[in-house]
Image (cartoon, grey):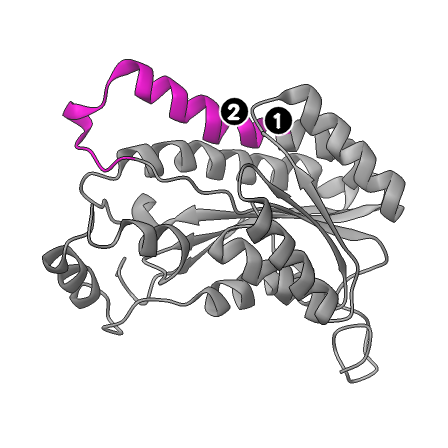
Amino acid sequence: MSRNGRGDGARPDFPEGAAVVIGGSGGVGRSICEGLARAGTDVALTFRGNESAASEAAEAVRAAGRGAAVHRLSVGDAAAVTSFFECVVADHGRIHTVVNATGANIAMRFISEVGLEEWREVIESDLGGFFNVVRASLPHLREGGGSYVVVSSVGLRRWPARDVLSVAPKAAMEALVRGIASEEGRFGIRANSVALGVIETGIFLRLEGRDFDPQWVNAARNNTALKRFGTAEEVTDAVVFLASARASYVTGQTLALDGGYSI
């Protein structure tokens, strides 16, 4: 494959500069970082606590022949997020892609069981953090155009019991995605999301056997049309496509990657 990520002499999937992956140390995030590198772009990835996993993700990017930078970042710190994007631009010249792939071990509860402080913490961390990312990155993407891709939840289409703390903030994040697509398209900025069903990596593997008992796992699998769960590589294919020039006329859309769970 050629350096442009296509191997066919056609226009490159990505321009010069870097893709940013917020949450690049996670199971899905690492796969996305590697996929972006294979498609021909350098990657700046963030982590919150797992530095060793972030370093492994960076090594995977370098093994694919692209540059990688690792940054510890709490997206709840607006000033730190602003400084992070300024640093990436200083190092790479420009930012052309921002992927939001963060995910935490959120408690599985019915709405009636969620406490007020727990609710506020999740909304501030997930939704507030994403807003900080958008606010800090938009001026840089306006310089030459670019793309946002948000990893979301198919729970917005078919409600998953006890998953309100994951789904509710993502509903507002998807509203922001559509707003960005509508308002920023004149600057060459696109925004899309990938709504995930159960993916066999990261959070699912950490919660399997605890919040996800064998009965839940079997029921979730049987509720998909394909009778299986997704993989990190399948998520990566969708995210890289939406971020790349191959989707240059796609914006404001949500792609359900759920094996048919939502139909």
Q: Is residue 257 visible?
A: yes
As for residue 119 lying within the magenta part, the answer is yes
Where residue 226 appears, x then y in whole percent?
27, 74
Drawn side of residue 221 relative to residue 95, left or right = left
Q: Position of residue 137 (x, y in %)?
A: 72, 34
Q: Is residue 74 above or below residue 246?
A: above
Q: Is residue 175 left or right of residue 221?
A: right
Q: Secondary structure at mark 2?
A: helix
Q: Quadrant of the C terminus?
A: bottom left
* Residue 39 in view (yes/no): no
Amino acid residing under circle 1:
Asn
Q: Is residue 133 above or below residue 92?
A: above
* Dot 2 and dot 1 residues touching (CB under 8 Å): yes
Q: Position of residue 211 (x, y in %)?
A: 20, 45
Residue bearing the label numbered 1: 132
- The span from disc 2 to disc 1 (Cα, nearest Å) is 6 Å
Quadrant assignment for the N terminus = bottom right
Write down the region rendered in magenta. Answer: 107-132
| Residue named by callout 2 | 128
Query: Which of the pair 61/222 is nearer the observer?
Result: 61
Residue 104 among magenta residues: no
- SS assignment at label 1: helix
